[in-house]
Image (cartoon, coloured by chain):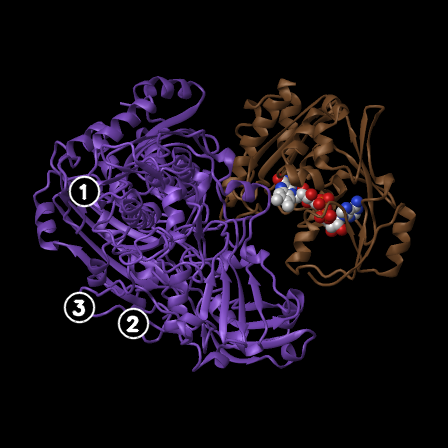
């Protein structure tokens, strides 16, 4: 039998089509008679719409229709939010309406207020220019820290103090008591900078209505087409779900931003029937900046209580989290369920309290972005831990060791139960790979070149594969959290897997094929993976939160196991043996203890050509479906170590080394995992050094509205990463896998900022805001308490 | 994009004839600035006159210690030209540091100068080297060319034909890249000639400008230390989210020092 295909860096099956331009993205799909949509967007952060005159636009050349908010009223509902948070006061969160086209008011720069449909995009744009909107411009608030201040402009009149909810987790009284007795308290106040996702493929949609059978087909850049369909049909458009097919073909990156149900595709789908023509819309990059859901945007004050010898006693965190102008699909659960619950990190901190105030601001909606809540939590914990270590003069690795959780399962004080992990192992391997022992001599050498060199750690934890559904439901989830899969064995034994998970860069077509090939003893080439089509796939919750393999992969395994179980029945009949005596291994059914065997393909053939077949007991065919609802989250964890050099003259920071040692449980395809880590690190480093979404405080204009002002990391901003994995298999899924998609973005920001503050600590600089741009670092150096400070 | 007419003349004469059809016409060179403006509907020319087929605008020649570069010469070609690397290596370096490979393979010297982006690299080199901009109508010394934000001495319909760069004793360019756009947040070109030193700055003001105080000091001592204490007043310098005026003023000094170091190495 050949070596296991699990754990092999099988080349990605999908790369041929991506690298040769043979992929099919939404914008590549064109149908006869298709029209083009253009959305007129608000130039103001906050304004009352006194009137909209579309007369000239409707008469403009090529225009088929112009729709404004009023045209949708009564037919198109507001967009729903998928998670109900209940506040400390016992009240449900405030859910102001989110009309797909603004009604009465616009609430952020980019808020769509009209859709023009025309024969060409340029005609639609021309017509949009002739729409006269009479705005009464109103004052705006864009800074979450200012949103609840008395007198702050209200985003929604019915939401006092712009407060969506005030939510808490943990035992506040016990935490306060622990602080009162602490030997040392470390306090930090910071902003977790707002980010704009910038997937390489902008959002796009093509909506078709078929008068013949009263059905709809929507091609859309979605990470979860079934959820998109469910929300759209059941909540917004009141369409029969079975008459709507949503296809998310090749999708060029999502990072969370394509999870959500957006206004554009909703209006497009509705309008396709109104005009009885297919309508296409593809966002331009400028629109992506304005109207994709953004990420992060927290203002936090965090305190860690310790004993004098560095044992953590309690953690207290207050966060104000921006929701933007409207609640996006999962906005409410990001700074709560996916944030506060992670604040134990890798540590046995016995008491934790976190309070979160979610606020509306006159900005684009904020929702999940790679890591979603967990990068923010890791930043809180790991910046505090490293700062405490420095204040107490304890080695940062040592203070972590003193507090690591070592007994599993471990129930945290913030609701999660970690099933397994080995935090000293990832720390030790990272220390070795990063050559921490040699750091001091590297630092001295850098000093001789006039550079400040620093090293920083981040020992992160994340929770992936959000689950189980019933627990999530009791916490406010309005959706299930399972995944579905169908494994269809063809008469020749070749296999098509239909997964409810979606790949937009993750390499499912390869990884999932490996999982199936391993189990069936077939080759990766004989297994195709189909995803992203409600017309072909039974159901699915899609891809987010690093859940694809842990949840989607497990559903596939369950379906494969059903195939094998049925195959054994067929084989027993063909081999004239008892079913209990049939074994399956290496692609063959064998009668235990004999040399009588049947290859898998032959059993498959029998299932479809059932001449010699137990038709009285067994249905023909070999096609099995499974739904899998996990019993717990998975808990990937790891240790990142970053080394930086700072140019004193310009304030510029270069990352000279970056080491990431991650525990993702079992690794199916090391190359794909490494790619996921690289991408995540790039985004995490981007957050720490480069990326910041800036809205003008006075006007609410998006200052960083293009790549000319919003700094994405480029390859030469990054070092060559040193990455490795450690393995403690997840205990509650058959593959032992945990998830790897977000780890880089979760761990990296704290590691980078810990390295920068390490370099600057001798100068008396204790903290810096992200992103640590050259100007930010230079300013800190200018006002450093000890400008010529040297190391103790 | 709004609709426009398009012509592709073969000679400067034909271009002039095309111009007579419309006083609102725009020239198209590499399109790296103009096409963006068109796509964003920020410009609405009725006619585009594509300069790419006009041979007179192309080519690099070195004679009598002057490097003449045709306006339509691509950044990549300037960067790769052996004769430029030999005569004025700092100029080749400037071209090599513009944008990315795609931009360098399309963007042109003439387009960059006519566009006069406050953060563009070439203006620092042109001003620093004391070059002469030769147009379809006249010769304009660099000192008289850059007038303000996206504003030059070019008259409507005037075409940059080539730029003549006198060969210096030594020269250096130091660029502090804008973190997002990679244009010059601040770029300083320093040039040592028999008739004195020139220091030209881009990125810091509405257009490229010289720093006479540094020039005087460097003429006496061409060392980075000599200008360490010369910091421009922040007032009047560009200020944005990436660099406030005082930071830009500081960077001018640091980049000038680094340009001197680069020049001194040659
Ligand atoms: C992604 C990107 C990154 C960039 N990075 C940098 C950078 O780091 N540094 C930098 O300096 N620049 C940078 N640029 C700008 C680039 O150098 C452009 O090439 C340059 O600004 C314009 O040159 P062009 O040939 O493309 O001109 P075009 O865009 O074709 O024209 C620009 C303007 O000049 C006029 N014009 C063109 N040629 C002539 C002529 N011969 N006579 C009179 N008028 C003329 C046109 O009518 C137009 O108004 C970047 C551009 C991009 C897209």
Image-based side of A213 in relation to B4, left or right: left
Q: Which chain is mark 1 on? A: A
Q: Colour of chain B?
A: brown
In the displayed structure, A220 sits above or below B98; it is below
- Neighbor class of circle 3 (other Cα within 10 Å; few <14, some 14-19, many 20+) is few
Q: Colour of chain A?
A: purple
Q: Which label was assigned to residue A90?
A: 3
Q: In which quarter of the image is residue B11?
A: top right
Residue that mark 2 sits on: A160
Q: Which chain is mark 3 on? A: A
Quarter of the figure that contains the N terminus of chain A: top left
Q: Do the residues labelled 2 and 3 touch (CB within 8 Å)?
A: no
Q: Residue A350, percent across and down? A: 11, 44
In the foreground, B200 or A242:
A242
N-term-proximal mark, 2 vs 1: 2
- Neighbor class of circle 2 (other Cα within 10 Å; few <14, some 14-19, many 20+) is some
Q: Do labels 2 and 1 share a chain?
A: yes
Q: Residue A615, percent across and down? A: 31, 57
Quarter of the figure that contains the C terminus of chain A: top left
Spatial separation of the CA atoms under disc 3 and disc 1: 31 Å
Q: Residue A205, percent across and down? A: 52, 62
N-term-proximal mark, 2 vs 3: 3
């Amino acid at each position: 039998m050949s070596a296991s295909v699990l754990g092999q860096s099988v080349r990605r099956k999908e790369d041929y089509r991506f690298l040769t331009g043979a992929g099919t993205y939404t914008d590549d799909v064109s149908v006869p008679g298709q029209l083009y949509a253009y959305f007129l967007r608000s130039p103001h952060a906050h304004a009352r719409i006194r009137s909209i005159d579309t007369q000239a636009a409707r008469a403009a050349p090529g225009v088929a229709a112009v729709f404004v908010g009023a045209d949708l009223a009564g037919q198109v509902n507001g967009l729903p939010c998928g998670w109900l948070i209940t506040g400390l006061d016992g009240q449900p969160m405030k859910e102001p309406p989110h009309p797909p086209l603004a009604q009465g008011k616009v609430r952020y720069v980019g808020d769509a207020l009209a859709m023009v449909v025309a024969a060409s995009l340029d005609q639609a744009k021309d017509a949009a220019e002739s729409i006269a909107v009479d705005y009464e411009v109103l004052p705006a608030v864009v800074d979450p820290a200012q949103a609840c201040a008395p007198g702050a402009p209200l985003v929604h009149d019915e939401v006092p103090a712009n407060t969506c909810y005030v939510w808490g987790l943990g035992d506040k009284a016990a935490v306060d008591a622990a602080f009162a007795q602490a030997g040392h308290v470390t306090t930090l106040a910071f902003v977790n900078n707002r980010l704009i996702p910038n997937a390489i493929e902008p959002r796009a949609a093509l909506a078709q209505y078929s008068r013949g059978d009263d059905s709809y087909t929507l091609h859309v850049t979605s990470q979860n087409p079934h959820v998109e369909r469910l929300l759209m049909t059941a909540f917004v458009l009141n369409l029969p779900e079975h008459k709507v097919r949503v296809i998310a073909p090749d999708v060029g990156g999502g990072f969370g931003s394509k999870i959500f149900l957006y206004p554009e595709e909703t209006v497009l789908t509705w309008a396709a029937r109104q005009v009885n023509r297919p309508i296409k819309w593809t966002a331009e990059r400028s629109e992506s900046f304005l109207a994709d859901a953004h990420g992060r945007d927290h203002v936090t004050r965090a305190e860690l209580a310790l004993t004098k010898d560095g044992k953590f006693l309690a953690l207290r965190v207050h966060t104000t989290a921006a929701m933007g102008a409207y609640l996006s699909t999962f906005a409410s659960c990001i700074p709560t369920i996916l944030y506060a619950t992670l604040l134990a990190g890798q540590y046995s901190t016995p008491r934790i309290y976190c309070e979160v105030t979610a606020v509306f601001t006159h900005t684009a909606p904020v929702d999940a972005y790679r890591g979603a809540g967990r990068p923010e939590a890791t930043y809180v914990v790991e910046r505090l831990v490293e700062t405490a270590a420095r204040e107490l003069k304890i080695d940062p690795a040592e203070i972590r060791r003193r507090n690591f959780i070592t007994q599993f399962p471990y129930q945290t004080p913030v609701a999660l139960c970690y099933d397994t992990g080995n935090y000293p192992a990832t720390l030790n391997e990272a220390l070795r790979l990063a050559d921490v022992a040699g750091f001091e001599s590297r630092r001295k050498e850098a000093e001789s070149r006039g550079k400040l060199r620093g090293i920083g750690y981040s020992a992160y934890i994340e929770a992936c594969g959000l689950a189980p559904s019933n627990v999530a439901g009791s916490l406010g989830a309005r959706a299930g959290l399972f995944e579905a899969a169908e494994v269809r064995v063809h008469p020749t034994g070749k296999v098509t897997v239909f997964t409810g998970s979606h790949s937009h860069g993750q390499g499912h077509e390869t990884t999932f094929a490996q999982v199936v090939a391993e189990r069936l003893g077939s080759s990766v080439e004989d297994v195709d993976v189909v995803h992203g089509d409600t017309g072909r796939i039974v159901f699915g919750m899609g891809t987010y939160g690093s859940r694809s393999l842990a949840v989607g992969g497990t559903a596939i395994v369950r379906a494969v196991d059903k195939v094998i179980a049925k195959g054994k029945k067929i084989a027993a009949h063909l081999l004239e043996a008892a079913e209990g005596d049939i074994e399956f291994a290496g692609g063959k059914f064998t009668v235990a203890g004999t040399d009588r065997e049947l290859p898998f393909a032959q059993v498959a053939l029998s299932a479809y050509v059932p001449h010699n077949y137990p038709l009285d007991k067994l249905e023909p065919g070999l096609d099995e479906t499974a739904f899998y609802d996990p019993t717990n989250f998975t808990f990937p964890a790891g240790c990142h170590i970053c080394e930086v050099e700072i140019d004193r003259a310009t304030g510029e920071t270069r990352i000279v080394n970056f080491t990431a040692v991650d525990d993702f449980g079992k690794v199916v395809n090391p190359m794909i995992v490494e790619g996921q880590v690289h991408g995540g690190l790039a985004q995490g480093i981007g957050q720490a050094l480069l990326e910041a979404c800036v809205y003008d405080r006075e006007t609410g204009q998006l200052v960083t509205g293009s790549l000319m002002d919003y700094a994405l990391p480029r390859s030469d901003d990054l070092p060559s990463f040193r990455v490795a994995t450690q393995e403690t298999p997840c205990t509650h899924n058959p593959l032992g896998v945990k998830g790897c998609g977000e780890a880089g973005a979760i761990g990296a920001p704290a590691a980078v900022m810990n390295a920068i503050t390490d370099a600057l600590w001798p100068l008396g600089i204790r903290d810096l805001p992200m992103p640590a741009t050259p100007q930010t670092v230079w300013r800190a150096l200018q006002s450093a308490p000890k400008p010529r400070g040297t190391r103790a | 994009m709004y609709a426009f007419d398009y012509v592709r003349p073969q000679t400067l004469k034909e271009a002039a004839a095309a111009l007579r059809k419309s006083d609102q016409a725009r020239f198209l060179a590499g399109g790296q600035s103009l096409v963006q403006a068109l796509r964003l509907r920020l410009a609405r020319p009725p006619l585009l006159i594509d300069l790419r087929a006009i041979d007179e605008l192309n080519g690099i020649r070195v004679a009598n210690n002057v490097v003449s570069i045709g306006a339509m010469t691509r950044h990549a070609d300037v960067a790769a030209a052996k004769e430029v690397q030999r005569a004025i290596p700092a100029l080749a370096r400037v071209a090599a540091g513009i944008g990315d490979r795609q931009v360098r393979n399309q963007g042109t010297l003439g387009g960059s100068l006519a566009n006069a982006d406050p953060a563009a690299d070439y203006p620092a080199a042109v001003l620093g080297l004391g070059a002469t901009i030769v147009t379809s109508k006249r010769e304009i010394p660099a000192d008289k060319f850059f007038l303000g934000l996206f504003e030059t001495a070019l008259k409507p319909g005037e075409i940059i034909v080539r730029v003549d760069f006198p060969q210096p004793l030594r020269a250096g360019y130091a660029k502090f890249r804008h973190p997002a756009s990679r244009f010059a947040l601040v770029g300083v070109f320093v040039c040592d000639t028999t008739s004195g030193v020139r220091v030209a700055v881009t990125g810091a003001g509405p257009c490229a400008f010289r720093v006479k105080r540094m020039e005087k000091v460097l003429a006496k001592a061409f060392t980075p230390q000599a200008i360490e204490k010369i910091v421009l007043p922040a007032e009047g310098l560009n200020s944005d989210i990436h660099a406030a005026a005082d930071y830009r003023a500081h960077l001018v000094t640091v980049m000038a020092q680094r340009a001197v170091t680069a020049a001194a190495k040659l």
